[in-house]
Image (cartoon, rainbow, N blue to C red):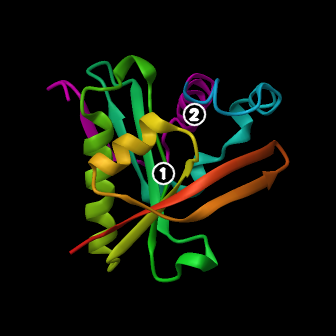
Amino acid sequence: MTKSTIIRSCKKDENFSEISKLYLKTWKSAYKDLLPQKLLSQLNEKTWSPQKRWQNTLIAENSSNKIIGVCSFGPTRSDMFSNFGEIYSIYIDSEYQHIGIGSQLLKQALDKLIQGGYHSVFLWVIYNNMPAIKFYKKMGFKTIGKTRIDKSKLGETKERAMSIYLK
């Protein structure tokens, strides 16, 4: 991570449009060969509502205060993982990947989940997103369970769960 990058908690009056733009950019880049083009072409800035989770979101900014990374987390949204914490999303601008920003965001999110009383954390990852799976394994996550199919208004995605036990 560069010295000029800072990681901070999201604020209630954050520029959520900038976060949505980052989500859109990273989805179209990271998932272009992993998800159906039909699904990706339906996405726009209004697809996401990052303001709903502002209390459980970390932001990475560059020296110009541009948001270059986001990580959202909190209690599980899945009945399969009761009492787990969950990493809802982690996205890094493609121009800032592979310099440690994702690792720092994830570590700080896990620390906050520990502070919240969670001992286990899971996340969903696109089943064939090998760069992300490799990153999560490097961070200590292990694949658990079977692949699930998530059907939404935007289309169908296949995901696998990964988890980590926090001491």
Above or below: residue 118 compared with residue 63? below
Q: Position of residue 116 (x, y in %)?
A: 33, 75
**Label 2 secondary element:** helix
Q: Position of residue 126 (x, y in %)?
A: 59, 45
Q: Quadrant of the C terminus?
A: bottom left
Residue at 27 percent across and 73 percent down: it is: 115
Above or below: residue 137 compared with residue 44? below
Residue matched to label 1: 12
Q: Position of residue 3 (x, y in %)?
A: 14, 26
Which quadrant holds residue 132?
top left
Badges 1 and 2: C-beta atoms under 8 Å apart? no
Q: Nearer the viewer, residue 157 or 58?
A: 157
Question: Reading the chain from its start, which is encountered first: label 1 or label 2?
Answer: 1
Q: Amino acid at mark 2?
A: Tyr
**Which is more foreground, mark 1 or mark 2?**
2
Is disc 1 surrounded by few (<14), some (14 to 19) or many (20+) residues within 10 Å? few
Q: Is residue 25 magenta?
A: yes
Q: Is residue 57 magenta?
A: no
Range covered by the magenta-colored residues:
1-29
Report the Cα–Cα distance between label 1 and label 2: 18 Å
> Is 124 left, or right, of 96 in this rendering?
right
Disc ID at residue 23 = 2
Q: Nearer the viewer, residue 63 or 85?
A: 85
Residue at 35 percent across and 77 percent down: it is: 118
